[in-house]
Amino acid sequence: MTDHGPGPNPSGTVYGRTSGPDRLSRALTIGVGAGVVAVLVLGYAAWTSTGGTGESPAAAATTSAPDPVTTTPEPGPSPVTPQLAAGSWLLSPLGDEDTYLTANGEYAKMSPADPATLTVSAGLADGTCFSFRLEDGRYLRHFDYRMRFDTSDDSDLFRADATFCREAGTDPGTVRLRSKNYPDHLLHRRDDGSLYIDKESGTSFMVQVPS
């Protein structure tokens, strides 16, 4: 037999082991693909944890945190101002608590001396209003528009003259006194301390507890 020496490679597919560079390229491709998949998985997990809003978990936690609750301390109880009602009281003009309604003989006046404790009761002519009586039994009434203290004669005129209806004064807790039978007149302190029913705004009185 005649030995044939090496000849040219036949055309077509050549079977055998791949070269080193081709194997490295395939490994890199697989690694990159796996990394992309991992990134996508992590991104989806983060997206679903925020409810699909696109916010990061930290941002979602920040926006969902409740607003802080601020508590305003409740004010303490305010001083109780006595209100005119049935009972025993002193009456002082607003802003002058050391001056009192008192008796000067038969007349009523405002004075810092000898304050009169007045017994306040339902009005003699109207139970929704008030009448004012001294300890000696005399009632505060108007006569010729001037305020005075007289003993009741049990007449309708006297009862009406001695009845005064309460209304709010100019400051909280104060009262004004309107004449029952002269409803456009209010009890008013004049400059000399005398008391009349006048067509004025009326004096606002503070009610004080006798000491």
Image: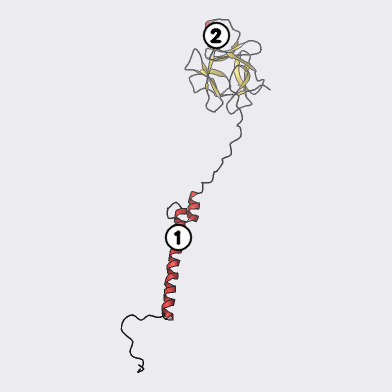
Tell me which colouring the rendered structure shows: secondary structure
Q: Residue at x 49, y 49 (%)?
A: 64
Q: Residue at x 57, y 19 (%)?
A: 194
Q: Is residue 17 found left or right of 102 in the rendered image? A: left
Residue 166 or 134: which is nearer the viewer? 166
Q: Is residue 168 above or below residue 3?
A: above
For the residue carrying disc 1, how many other residues have a C-alpha within 10 Å: few (<14), some (14-19), or many (20+)? Answer: few
Q: Is residue 197 above or below residue 80?
A: above
> Which residue position holds label 2?
159
Q: Nearer the viewer, mark 1 or mark 2?
A: 1
Measuring from the top left, give residue 65's x and y in whole percent: 51, 49
Compute the Cα span from label 1 to label 2: 98 Å
For the residue carrying disc 2, how many other residues have a C-alpha within 10 Å: few (<14), some (14-19), or many (20+)? Answer: many
Measuring from the top left, give residue 2's x and y in whole percent: 35, 94
Measuring from the top left, give residue 132's x and y in whole percent: 59, 14
Q: Quadrant of residue 120?
A: top right
Amino acid tagged 1: Val
> Which residue position holds label 1?
41
Amino acid tagged 2: Arg
* Mark 1 vs 2: CB contact within 8 A: no
Residue 25 or 151: which is nearer the viewer? 25
- First along the sequence among labels 1 and 2: 1
Callout 2: SS: helix
Measuring from the top left, give residue 59's x and y in whole percent: 48, 55
Q: Quadrant of residue 83?
A: top right
Q: Is residue 103 above or below residue 35?
A: above
Residue 130 or 182: which is nearer the viewer? 130
Callout 1: SS: helix
